[in-house]
Amino acid sequence: MGIGEDGPDGLSSPARLLLGQARLVVGGARHLALADRLIQGERMAWPSPMAGGVAAILARRPAPVVVLASGDPFFDGVGVMLAAAVPLGEFLSIPAASSVSLALSRLGWSMRRTANISLCGRPLAALAPLLQPGRNVLAFSADATTPAAVAGYLCERGFGASRLHVLEALGGPRERVRTALAAGFDLAECHPLNLVAIEVVAGPDAQVIPLSTGLPDDMFEHDGQITKREIRAVTLSALAPRAGEILWDVGCGSGSIAIEWMLRHPENMAYGVESDPARAARIARNAVMLGVPGLRVVEGRAPEVLADLPPPDAVFLGGGAHLPGMIETCWHALRPGGRLLANAVVIETEAALFAAVQKYGGTLTRLSVERLDNIGTLHGFRPGMTVTQWAAVKA
């Protein structure tokens, strides 16, 4: 049952009746306080971890239990967790207006043009891919300090001209909406229950992350060990990311392939395997700077460290494909329908890829790029190293 900051006054008559008849009412301390005058049964605040509370709810079958939630229980809320444990025919959901709906109505914003993100338990770096000039972002704050932290983060990335709206305690008697620019943000004493709405304005040096594959090489910190922009774009195309899939990036280098894989969809996951400690640390820094702090960096030697990773939907071998057992290990780990891709620039690895295409099938493609360069006082195109790419799909 969704409940807003207006408490029982915002509940329908059927919701009030069900709440009053419940043998057990579960919720956060704030929810229980909001519904206090209607609760007749036992109360239980969510324990930590919340899984213990789910077990207690299931133990009450078939007695009626009401679980209180903020707004719409299925807008990334507790309803999703409970529905995984309770059969569909055993529960009824009564949503209230979500804080997102309330915020959009206060600001007159289009839901279609507004990106949503929760900063509860997530680093601010997750905002980076959403900072697209001229677009809107609605962020769920972790606490009263989040608005100022968001303003500072925007300034660091060159978005200081962005307009921030802090929407506090929406739908209740303490509701307040205040506005300030990120640069010089001065809104004090924010209510802990707040959302930050951002009208994104990019300065001339803003770090805007393009929506395309093949990000500029200079967006990554690297020591030369990086899949170059043009080859990376072709590689991502062949890896064919789909929503919610897992990638192994073996021989991760700067992390460019793994990072761009995760940028394709917010539910994508990648494991960057790298044996060099300095490069592993560099991958982690790149992931934070480019807005995918959830990238898992695995420091160690492949194929040995691969045994502890979850099965992948795709594997990219940026290096080490010629090592004994490497291709075989990755191929057998792939889920059915998974894609394996390997790039080679040296003869030894090319030989391993030729053997792989004979054993597993797939295609071999040679990729070359030429870039304009100075030749004395004149100019000419200088070729980069040719890349041989093997791509295969596991039946």
Image: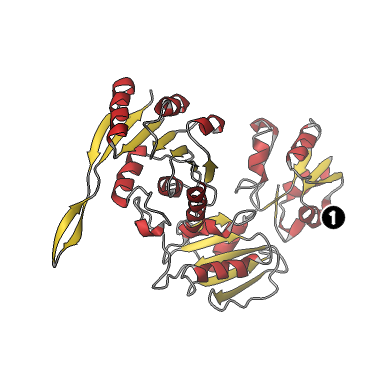
Residue flagged by tag 1: what amino acid is it?
A: Arg
> Which quarter of the picture shows residue 151?
bottom right
Residue 124: horizontal and vertical position, in percent? 57, 60
Query: Residue 89: where, in percent of width, then height?
Result: 66, 31
Residue 297 is left or right of residue 141, and the answer is left
Is residue 388 shown above or below 149? Answer: above
The coloring applied to the image is secondary structure
The residue at the point 61 percent across, 74 percent down is 178
Rendered residue at 14%/58% (across/down): 380
Name the outermost residue toward the top. 359
User: Is 29 on the left or on the right of 368, as rendered?
Assistant: right
Q: Is residue 15 above or below residue 195?
A: above
Nearer the observer, 288 or 13:
288
Query: In terms of image quadrants, where is residue 102?
Result: bottom right
Residue 207 visible in the picture: yes
Residue plotted at (26% across, 32% down): 364
Quadrant of res 81? top right
The number of numbered discs placed on residues in the rendered structure image is 1
Residue 106 in sight from this viewpoint? no
Quadrant in the picture for the C terminus:
top left
In the rendered image, residue 325, in percent from the top left (x then y), is placed at 43, 25
Relative depth, front residue between 271 and 226: 226
**What is the secondary structure assignment of the residue under circle 1?**
helix
User: Dot 1: few (<14), some (14–19), or many (≥20) neighbours within 10 Å?
Assistant: few
Q: Position of residue 173 (x, y in %)?
A: 73, 68
The residue that disc 1 covers is: 37
